[in-house]
Image (spheres, rainbow, N blue to C red):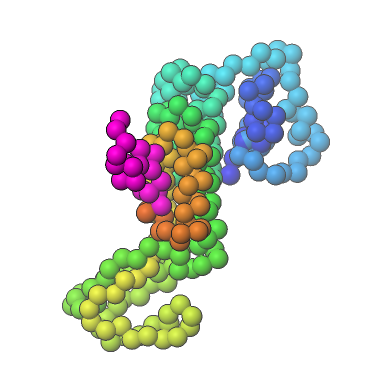
Amino acid sequence: MSLRLCIRQCQNLKSLPLIMHHPAQNSLIRMLRLGTVVLVPAGLALLSLPHPAKAAWNPFEICSLELIEENINAAEAALACAEALEPTDLSLCVLKINGLTPIDSKSALRACFRDRRPLELAECVVDITQEIEEQQLSSRYDAEPIEVNLGESVSPELVEGESGDIRLNVQPGMTFPWRSGEVIELQPGTLKLETNTVETHSQKTLDHCRRSLLPKRFSECVIGLRRSAKLPTDRALNTCIEAEDFPRNLFPFVAN
């Protein structure tokens, strides 16, 4: 998680008076911009006070500096910031997605650069990802099923649980503990085994949030359907993105 996020969010970073080049200043800003609550010595906090020589800050400099610190090469960072309507919104979008989800900075930059509401995009991705993480912490088996053929001579390795920490080679007739502690016997045939991770949904979440015209509303839709209708994540993502098109199936008599 980056210190750079709290100064921007806590101080409305559009009014940030300078760019910090001191290593300690950079670390403090990165954590603050990501919303991390930190306690710092008074002396370190003073490093963030504006210096007269740097009172005029430049949003393009902030943007490129932050993207480079997120492992974006200088040429790509310069081009992205130069073409961005709101350079600091672009870099903050990348900081949030890369710092608070499993998504890498390059994928985040591609999505943030293409979205007209980069900050809403970041909020959408982070909110859905955190919802998945929270539900998986409360239920180890909150995952979508895959079909496994238990009759194959070469048994596949199966990974169960949100973190993939339970691994077993399934063979016909073997047993293993199931959800509530009971032991079941796996018969040859097809079994639906629940397996998933936050990482498996992160790219899908990013893609769907970027496709949405209203990312904030989209994330609320996905989270609401997962909670109330108990929809798997993939289905909730697809249902909410399809709903942004006019619901012709519900109102077939209405012409364009």
Q: Is residue 115 above or below residue 230?
A: above
> Which of the 4 quarters of the picture holds residue 186?
bottom left
Residue that appears at 59% across and 16% down: 58
Q: Quick one: which residue is furthest to the left in this view? A: 153
Q: Position of residue 18 (x, y in %)?
A: 66, 20
Relative to the observer, which residue lies in front, 236 or 106?
A: 236
The residue range painted magenta reads 236-256
Q: Position of residue 143 (x, y in %)?
A: 42, 63
- Answer with left or right where residue 90 lies relative to residue 246: right
Residue that appears at 75% across and 24% down: 49
> Which of the 4 quarters of the picture holds residue 30?
top right
Residue that appears at 43% across and 82% down: 177
Q: Quadrant of the C terminus?
A: top left
Magenta run includes residue 247: yes
Q: Main secondary structure of the magenta part?
A: loop
Would residue 252 be visible to someone looking at this image? yes
Q: Position of residue 100 (x, y in %)?
A: 54, 45
